[in-house]
């Protein structure tokens, strides 16, 4: 795999990677579904909170801003980093949170309790959400940045990174499960 492509994939997806981790650290409080149920199961569950969405999205946007600021320095060492428009930054961060919400919605419909794993979905829900919302909010930016090759690298690299960060979060007691 091309090293530059891996670097670009990590760079462009960082504002979508951070929100879920920020939500683990800073989330909690009032659940988005307000305790409502559908066919006896929670709509989303206690693991999806307003504070998690808000602070997670904010963290992702801040990361995109930080990457924009550091782009000229990265350029000096030979890379040509992607810049984020505000719409793109918001789309990636909020979209990642939406993907995570959608996955929880599906998990509850399958009767899975909060925290139960759903392999594949757990690792890629936020990628799908980020791509969908960014395509809606910043279509030009999305089509310019996300080549087929870049999306391919993102789909391969993200699950590996996700598994690694979750193991770290589990070992440091930030998460109750290592997935
Ligand atoms: N979190 C939050 N708000 C969100 C997303 C996450 O507050 N929108 C916090 C919750 O404390 C949650 C933790 O981050 O328990 C871990 O997130 P995640 O693994 O996505 O949730 P789970 O608790 O595993 O619930 P689910 O089964 O619905 O994924
Ligand atoms: Mg979970």
Image: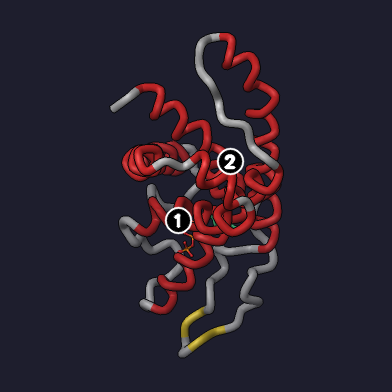
For label 2, being within 8 Å of ligand 1 is answered no
**On the image, numbered disc 2 is attached to which residue?**
15
> What x and y, as percent, mark residue 6?
39, 29
At horizontal 50% and vertical 59% (from top left) the residue drawn is: 100
Is 116 or 66 nearer to us in this picture? 66
Side of 126 relative to 35 (left or right): left
Task: Check the image and name the residue furthest to the left.
Answer: 1
Residue sitting farthest toward the bottom: 39
Identify the residue at image location x=70%, y=33%. 65
Real-space Cα separation, disc 2 to disc 1, in angstroms:
14 Å
Badge 1: few (under 14), some or many (20 or more) residues near its Cα, within 10 Å? some
| Position of 77 relative to 41 (above/below) | above
- Location of residue 93 in the rendering, given as x and y in whole percent from the top left corner: 61, 49
Label count reads: 2
The quarter holding residue 116 reads bottom left
Residue 128 is marked as 1
- Tell me residue 11's x, y (percent): 52, 31
Residue 130, position in %: x, y? 53, 52
Return the residue found at the far top. 77
- Mark 2 Cα-neighbour bin, 10 Å: few <14, some 14–19, many ≥20: many
Per the image, label 1 sits on a secondary structure element best described as: helix
Residue 38 circle label: none
Could you tell me which secondary element the residue under label 2 belongs to?
Answer: helix
Vertical arrangement, residue 143 with respect to residue 83, above or below: below
Of marks 2 and 1, which one's residue comes earlier in the chain? Answer: 2
Q: Quadrant of the N terminus?
A: top left
């Amino acid at each position: 795999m091309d090293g530059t492509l891996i670097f670009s994939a990590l760079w462009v997806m960082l504002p979508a990677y951070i929100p879920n981790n920020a939500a683990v650290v800073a989330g909690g409080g009032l659940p988005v579904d307000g305790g409502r149920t559908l066919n006896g199961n929670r709509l989303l569950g206690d693991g999806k909170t307003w504070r998690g969405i808000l602070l997670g999205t904010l963290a992702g946007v801040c990361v995109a801003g930080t990457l924009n600021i550091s782009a000229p320095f990265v350029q000096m060492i030979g890379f040509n980093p992607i810049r984020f428009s505000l719409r793109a930054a918001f789309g990636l961060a909020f979209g990642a949170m939406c993907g995570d919400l959608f996955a929880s919605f599906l998990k509850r419909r399958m009767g899975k309790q909060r925290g139960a794993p759903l392999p594949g979905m757990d690792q890629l829900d936020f990628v799908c959400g980020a791509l969908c919302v960014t395509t809606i909010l910043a279509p030009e930016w999305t089509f310019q940045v996300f080549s087929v090759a870049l999306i391919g690298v993102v789909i391969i690299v993200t699950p590996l990174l996700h598994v690694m960060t979750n193991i770290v979060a589990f070992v440091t007691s930030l998460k109750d499960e290592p997935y």
